[in-house]
Image (cartoon, helix red, strand yellow):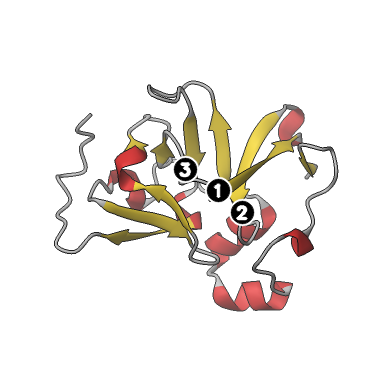
Amino acid sequence: MDHVDSDGKPKREDRYEVTKTDAEWRAQLDDAQYRVLRHQATERPFTSPLNKEYRPGMFSCAGCGAELFEATDKFDSGCGWPSFTQPKDDAVAESVDLSHGMRRVEVHCRRCGGHLGHVFDDGPAPTGLRYCINGVSLTFAPKDGALNPGGKDRR
């Protein structure tokens, strides 16, 4: 795949705070996480349990644990992947993705460089953005005592 930063240079692992060898990533991540986070794969739509996760809490990178998205910024876009209107400040970085014969904006973890998904300009207010994120690239930590309100978007 042709993944480059916005400056047109190939993404480099040494630009990140958390770096590991390929063997270390393989040992830490399950097969699906490894394919998505380290090789820019995409999980099948509507397969992530995080699609229906609406408790208050925090979505973090499955690779390094960096906090990425607040649950309050999650919405049901109907696309089949967890979607958010915005990441936490300075949590993600973006690069140009020229794979599949199109130009898209890839979103990756600023701390470890793990591929998260893509951002599109068809989201709701207030940002108008839709961060379409692979569920396997995330972990979720609910706030203490938070109950999931039936997996329904309450916005």
Residues at discs 3 and 2 in contact (Cβ within 8 Å): no
| Residue in the picture at 45% in, 41% down | 45
Residue 6 lies, in percent from the top left, at 76, 36
Which image quarter holds the C terminus? Answer: top left
> What kind of residue is marked 2?
Arg
Q: Secondary structure at mark 1?
A: loop
- Alpha-carbon distance for marks 1 and 2? 7 Å
> What kind of residue is marked 1?
Asp
Residue 58 lies, in percent from the top left, at 35, 55
| Residue in the picture at 72% in, 28% down | 103
Corner quadrant of residue 118: top right
Residue 144 badge: none
- Alpha-carbon distance for marks 3 and 2? 11 Å
Which image quarter holds the N terminus? Answer: top right
Which residue position is annotated with label 2?
110
Q: Residues within 10 Å of mark 2 (few under 14, many from 20)?
A: many
Residue 146 lies, in percent from the top left, at 16, 57
Which residue position is annotated with label 3?
87
> What kind of residue is marked 3?
Pro
| Residue in the picture at 43% in, 31% down | 79
Looking at the image, residue 9 sits to the left or right of residue 15; the answer is right
